[in-house]
Image: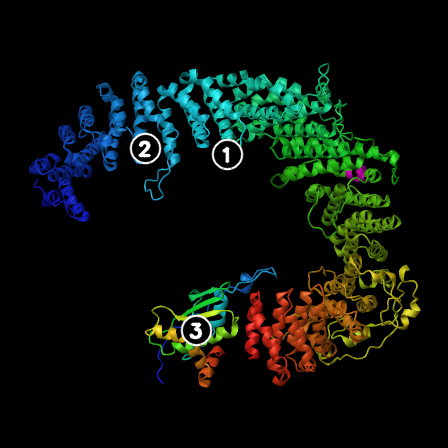
Amino acid sequence: MDLINPEPIIHERKNLKSNTDRTTTSEDQRDAIDPLEIFEHIRDITDPEHPYSLEQLNVVSEDLIDISDDKSSLRVQFTPTVQHCSMATLIGLCIRVKLMRVLPSRFKVDILITPGGHSTEEAVNKQLNDKERVAAALENPSLVQMVNNSLQGPKP
Amino acid sequence: MELPLEASQFVLDGQANPGTLAYRLQKVAEAARSGLSLLDLVRNLRDYLIAEEGETRARATLLLAKVLEEVPSSLTGQTDASHVAAFFAARLSDWPSFAAAIHGCETLLRQAGQTSGRSIATADAKVIATAFTDEVEVPGLAVALRQPALRVLQLLLEKFGTSLLKEGVNLIGMVIAATDAEKDPRCLMLAFSCFKLLGTVYAGAGCQSHLQEASDDLFDFVACYFPLTFTPPPDAAHNITRESMASELEATIAALPSLAEHVIPLLLEKLASSVRQSRADSLSAVKICVAAWGIEVLDPQLSAVWRGLRNVLLSHPDCDEDQEVVVKAGECLRDCVTSLAGQDNLELVDLALEDSSCQSLPMRIQEAASGDSEAAFHVSSAAFMLGMMCAGSGGACSRICQHLVPSLAALARSPSSGGQQWPSEQLNHQRLLTIQCLQTVVRCIKTSPGSEHAATDPSVAEALSPFCSRMLQVGAHEDSTESDENSIGSGHRPTASKADSTSEGVGSQVATAHIKLMSSLASFPFDSAPLDMMGLLRAARQLSLHVTDPQGITGDAASDQEGVSAAAAQGLASMAGAGKSSTLMLAWVVEQFVSSLRQCSHSCSKNGPGSQQTSAEEPPAGTRSSSQQASAILRALGAMATEAAGPRSSELRQLPLEPLLGTLAGDVIPACSTGARSQRPGPTGTAAKTQTPDGSAMVLAEEAAGAEKTQKLLQQVASDLMAFALQESQAARTMHDVILQALAWAAHAASFSCGQPSVVEQAASTIMQAVDGCRSAGYSSKHAEPAVAVAGCVVAACPPSVLPGDCRELVQQLTALAVHVDQASLASQAANVAAASILAKLPPGAIDSTVSAALAQLLPAQPSTVPVDDSSISSASPMETDGVPSPAQVDTSSAAPRAPTAVPLAIQPLPSSADSTPQDQAADPLQSYTPQAAPACFHDFTGIKAQQLHCLGWVLRALAMRGAQSMYQPLLRQYAQLLRQLPSEPGAVGAAAGMLETCFSSQGFDHRSMPGRGLHLTLGPSNHVQGRLLWQQRLLTVVLDELHPVLQAGPGSQPQAGGALWAAYARLMGALPDALAAREQPRLLPFLPTCLLRLADAVPADAPSLVALLNSCAASFHSPTGLALLTSEPGTLISGLMQLAAFRPAASVRSAALHALALLPGHVSWEALHSSKAAMAALLRNALDDIKRPVRQQAAVTKLAWT
């Protein structure tokens, strides 16, 4: 099968700030969930098409994450490597599933394509943020298998 | 030359874009540079210049002006310039061409004088000026035109002002007319400049009378802007600020002296304004005007100026801003004095001195002394005023000193005789106020803002000299000082005329204030010191008397004397750090101190060494003891040395340290030790303390230590210091803490630097005697701490090579002390540090049963005769007792049953446990804990027991380092028993855990004396060489042997004895090295799940233990044996881990527990985990929203593992 983007640009894995830099010393003070923490969760999701992580393909970035711990709201934008990427929905689904598993249930998560990042941006966004359609997708065993494969991270 | 086409295009095409216009202009300019003269251009543009269309005329005129600006050489001669000037002047009346014409005029005027022979002359300037006056109404123009118009006016004044004035042009009228009602900041700056030029031009031409005549109009212009109110708009591009405009306005006022009679009243009126900015601006303007106008102009106004400033200076500031204004007024007064002094005029100073505020100063001081707050304020304000004037000039300073100092000195002097008999308190207040007043004056001279010059001004210093001399006579010793000039340097205190005041607090304040005043005077920079060398020495003498006088110069209580002597010490220190002259002074003072110390010691010696002073022998009230004297002297020396050290350390070495230290060692210390009084009991430094509570002697000693010649002396000093400590403790009195700390550090420095065995031997001997003395005195903490602290310092500092071989008795004494000083935790710590230091440095052979018996007292438990010999350690440990084990030993040795062999230990039971005989206790060394069987001291495992266990930890570690298994095994055994018996109280847990932590921690320890084979080297998994200290492994092995049976017996039979035991277990698990942990898994891991469950309930949380335990747990999953042992009861393990995963006090514990839980699904069958799944899901739900990020992250990992 022909790849949609046969030669993607590979970016270096970033050295993120360590936890000690961001963690308060007081045991009673809350470390608010910040974009970096979310990014750490989703950076290692594998692209469905390539053996690279979403971070290496620059699909996800810390700058494109908006989170409010107080308001329990999270918005993640991702940028498919090409505008006509047919895997955009699957990537979005992987991100959503990963966040569903690692975040407290109180969060309202919006997964969006970076504006101008895809030819059918609106349709993909609508699909990714439709609760029923996401639930229906996760009832499909082959789709769940693909998502789980992606969530396992890049093969060493 | 032919006119380029672009010229016509420039004129006709007014709509072209700026780029095109610039290009066309450039073309014409190039033609002009190539030879086209301006007159040729005029001829060629003739039709345009006289065209009927105004715009065409304007553009043609503009072209001429631009070409003239670009190419000044286009004017070929003077005649051309005159023609062009006339042309532009004429065009000023042609409104369409006005902008171009004014531009041309400006260009012509700007080029005047720059191009000789081709620039305009005075006649042409007059033509322009006339046209400007007749045709241009500047105020009616737009801002864009007013600016060039005012620039033209400015250039006319600047370049032709004087000429035009001679030609009869009314320049004043021109300027006033042009600047009328100006409000634009850019135009105003030009207008201010024009006014300034007016002043210059008329003054230069000697026509000030004209200005005088027009002063009303000129003042109207100035007055309407003062004080200036301007807030620049945020987007202003002109960068004009309020400050720059105000400064320009002040300069304008200053440039017009003829306005003085109008301006000064205005400024003084604004000075009384309620608006702070107005007052600040007025003060600034007054300062500038006084500087610019001089006494000739100001003479009639000077008294008004003085009154205005005086009113501000004497006003009550309501807030900080007002206070700032007062300070500004002071600075203004100072600058005015400086300005007028430049003309040899002191009229302002005379006005001030004649003023009632200064005349009444002595009277006001007396009023203030009787409690009049208004008078007190007046005194402080007047002092500030006088100080600022003094700072203004040497002449002013001299005049003020002559006028006021005699009367003030009389007030500051000791009580008046024959006069009014005032209450002594009021009299002292009066003296205090007077001295403070003088202090303010000196402070103003030295430190008032902007008066840096005053402190270094030789004339000011010269003027202050008589003042200083006077003040030196003011002190309490004035009579004797005056009559005993030649006694300086003799070291003998003159007969003091005591202040007859009995008011203690105020008396010391007076003395302190006087000392500060003298310090202030004496610490002027060297080049301008107002005191000559003799004056300095006299000041130093007075200050040193304050330090050394045993009776105190104020007759105050000892506590107040302390404050006075501290102030004097600080004064001496500031003198020491002030300048080169102080080296001599410093040397002299040290000499005096040595002498005083000798006197002090002789007086103390009268009581005889070791004698106990009774209450009847105590010094009378108001007299300091010898100990206090020595303390004050040492403190002063320390302050001086500290101040003079650092960059001046080389100078410090020149000080007469030898006699000082010799005196300390030979006279002072023995004497003080007998005469020391308990004055200030309180906690003193411990041996482990690293900061210097009083750096005095340490600085001296360390400085001296660098010099070889003083080494021998230092040894002697160190010996005597320790003798001092010994005598102190024998006398059962608390040493004066300052002396003690200073001496302790001196001993430290001395022993560290000289490293002589004799010193250290003496230290050991001293410690023993000190400890013995402490015991006989009843083990009071206050007495024990200092001695042991000194001991700890010395012993810890000495190199092992010089430690005396036979320290057994010393160890005995120290440990006994640590046990018995129940109320003295600091002494206990100090003792154990000292003991551990010694033990670590002793050769193994030096530790015998005697030492062991002494150490056993640290642990108030039953003696045990169940032995554990070296062979049992060898069998249980992967290494030999005295060497590096072979790999085979490590791999094959097993936990073989121990083969108990009796060792000849005779551990002495404490009296408290005497009800239980050694034989009975030996029958069951691991007997169950029962309250009846327990010694009395077990009922209270609070702080002191924790301390004892802590001490034991140090000793055990030290013993283990030396390889003395026979010593630490019995102790550990007793400790293991204790763990079982300890109730699970927080204090007990802390004590027990603290003990083990101390034993096993990897913190740095001085193991320089260890034999080379004390290190066990192995190859790590990645072929890295790993080194582990054998002593640590030995200790761990023995602890394991002792702990294991207790663990087996404890939890089941003694449910109440859990916390301490499990804490110890957790510590042990955390401390075990990998190889040992792998070997000991079968013995230890079965307890782990229970420990997890029990420790989670332990209060307070012992997070490090729990984390260590959880890490051990996680590591054990990777070995088949460990996995099998741990998962034999998965329910208990999971419950324990889940309990810790919700351990609220420490996130690290939660994280570690979640990590261990995450490993379970990979190693345990799903069936075994299934029953915990629901609880786990609930736990993870909470953990994913934990307040700590690492926990959340670990929870996410764990959730993935479990789903």
The residue labelled by disc 2 is B189
Q: Secondary structure at mark 1?
A: helix
Secondary structure type for disc 2: helix
- Position of the C terminus of chain B by quadrant: bottom right
Which residue is at a point 75% across and 78% down the rendered structure image?
B1083
Which one is in front in this view, the residue at disc 3 or the one at disc 1?
1
Task: Check the picture and name the quadrant holding the N terminus of chain B.
Answer: top left
Task: Tell me which secondary structure the magenta stretch mostly adopts.
Answer: helix
Q: Indicate the amino acid at tag 1.
A: Glu
Dot 3 and dot 1 within a common chain? no
- Quarter of the image for residue A4 reads bottom left
Residue B438 coordinates in the image, percent (x, y): 61, 25
CA neighbours of label 2 inside 10 A, class few (<14), some (14 to 19), many (20+): many
- The amino acid sitting under disc 3 is Leu
Disc 1 residue crowd, few under 14, some 14–19, many 20+, Cα 10 Å: few
Same chain? Circles 1 and 2: yes
Q: Gap in Å between the C-alphas at discs 1 and 2? A: 29 Å
State the residue lying farthest toward the left: B47
Q: Do tag 3 and tag 2 residues touch (Cβ < 8 Å)?
A: no
Name the residue that disc number 1 marks: B321
- Parent chain of label 1: B
Q: Which residue is mark 3?
A: A54
Chain of the residue displaying label 3: A
How far apart marks 3 and 1 lie (CA) works out to 61 Å
Amino acid type, mark 2: Met
Instruction: Please give the range of residues in magenta.
Output: B664-669
Name which quarter of the figure residue B911 lies in.
Answer: bottom right
| Whether marks 3 and 2 lie on the same chain | no
